[in-house]
Image (cartoon, rainbow, N blue to C red):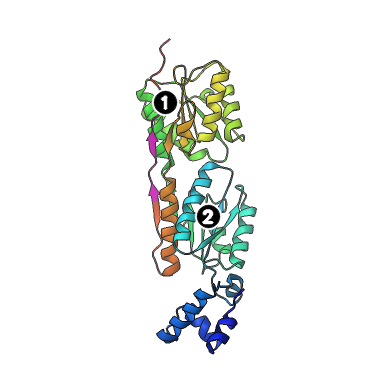
């Protein structure tokens, strides 16, 4: 590996001069800087990020913490963030918290020791006051999808409650009055509030018998909960699922029970992950602006990295109902 010493010896200059030139210091004459950079490129010199970190410098690295990598929604956000970060000349380091505050703290401490330039934390499990105590003040942070008020960091959120309201109101327009709700204990609270609010606004009485919430998640969780709902005395004509993966499982369960989607029962998901348009029955869902989330979070973070005095931002993005083939006018008995 070519070192700063190699370049210095070839040109007969000090190592410190080479280091300053590589880092665009104004203390090096333009002509000398040009010669050093040209030789560095010719020799394919690569900066030693670890050495820079030990020297007290940052490493052009952004730390990203997400709850789950297996979840397609978070995977798509990671992909968008990485694309933008690379465009900015940075790299990423990734941690998975599993919605566990201790695991999240571990990655925050690890990233801080690695001298990252900034951090994006998606769906933080740590209260705002505690985050402030464990994140060094010199590391810019953007929080994505945080349900808590946070006066310390910039935030990027999606208006989940109104996204659910739009979905439920669409089902009501199709004539549905018995609208089921499938959720999990981790991601349900805000979306359940939107469900209840939409029912109330349309003069539909809330019924526990149409709601199924437990710890099970992903396709299996949606499958089991849909079977649960369909085995009850009061059966739904439509079902809202808090995410697309559970909606996929719910559709499978309905078919196992001999129901046709959407002729016998309508299903709506949330997120609009990449696979949804290509299912056997393309799913009506609430599209989260994942691309915007990734782009804006990096944009806000870069402003803070380049200007420590930049203003904190709290941005709320709107989701969008995407109507496909899994919903239809209520079947008249």
Query: Does residue 52 sit above or below 156 in this rendering?
Result: below
Q: Quadrant of residue 233?
A: top right
In percent of width and height, residue 270 lies at: 46, 36
In percent of width and height, residue 112 lies at: 59, 65
Q: In front: mark 2 or mark 1? A: 1
Disc 2 from disc 1: Cα separation = 35 Å
- SS class of the residue under badge 2? strand
Q: Is residue 52 visible?
A: yes
Q: Is residue 222 magenta?
A: no
In percent of width and height, residue 215 lies at: 61, 35
Residue on which the image places disc 1 = 325
Q: Is residue 319 magenta?
A: yes
Residue 121: give its label: 2
Range drawn in magenta: 316-326
Query: Does residue 69 sit above or below 180 in this rendering?
Result: below
Query: Does residue 56 sit above or below 195 in this rendering?
Result: below
Q: What residue appears at the point 52 percent right and 61 percent down from the top-left corner?
A: 91
Q: Is residue 146 visible?
A: no
- Taking depth in this image into account, of 85 and 12 the one nearest to the observer is 12
Q: Earlier in the sequence, mark 2 or mark 1?
A: 2
């Amino acid at each position: 590996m070519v070192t700063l010493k190699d370049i210095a010896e070839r040109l007969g200059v000090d190592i410190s001069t080479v280091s300053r030139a590589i880092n665009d210091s104004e203390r090096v004459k333009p002509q000398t800087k040009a010669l050093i950079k040209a030789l560095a490129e010719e020799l394919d010199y690569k900066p030693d990020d670890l050495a820079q970190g030990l020297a007290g410098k940052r490493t052009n690295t952004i730390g990203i913490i997400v709850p789950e990598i297996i979840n397609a929604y978070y995977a798509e956000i990671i992909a968008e963030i990485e694309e933008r970060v690379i465009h900015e000349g940075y790299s990423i380091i990734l941690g998975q918290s599993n919605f566990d505050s201790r695991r999240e703290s571990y990655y925050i401490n690890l990233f801080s020791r690695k001298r990252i330039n900034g951090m994006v934390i998606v769906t933080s499990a740590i209260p705002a006051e505690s985050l402030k105590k464990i994140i060094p003040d010199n590391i810019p942070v953007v929080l994505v999808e945080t349900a808590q008020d946070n006066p310390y960091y910039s935030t990027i959120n999606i208006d989940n409650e109104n996204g659910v309201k739009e979905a439920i109101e669409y089902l009501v327009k199709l004539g549905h009055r018995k609208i089921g709700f499938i959720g999990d204990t981790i991601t349900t609270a805000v979306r359940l509030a939107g469900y209840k609010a939409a029912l109330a606004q349309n003069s539909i009485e809330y019924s526990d018998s149409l709601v199924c919430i437990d710890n099970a998640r992903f396709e299996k969780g949606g499958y089991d909960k849909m079977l649960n709902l369909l085995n009850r005395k009061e059966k739904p004509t439509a079902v809202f699922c808090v995410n697309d993966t559970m909606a996929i499982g719910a559709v499978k369960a309905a078919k196992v029970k001999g129901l046709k989607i959407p002729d016998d029962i309508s299903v709506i998901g949330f997120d609009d992950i990449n696979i949804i348009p290509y299912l056997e029955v393309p799913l009506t869902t609430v599209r989260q602006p994942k691309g915007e989330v990734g782009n804006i979070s990096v944009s806000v973070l870069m402003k803070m990295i380049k200007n420590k005095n930049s203003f904190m931002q709290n941005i709320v993005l709107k989701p969008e109902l995407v109507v496909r083939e899994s919903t239809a006018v209520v079947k008249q008995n």
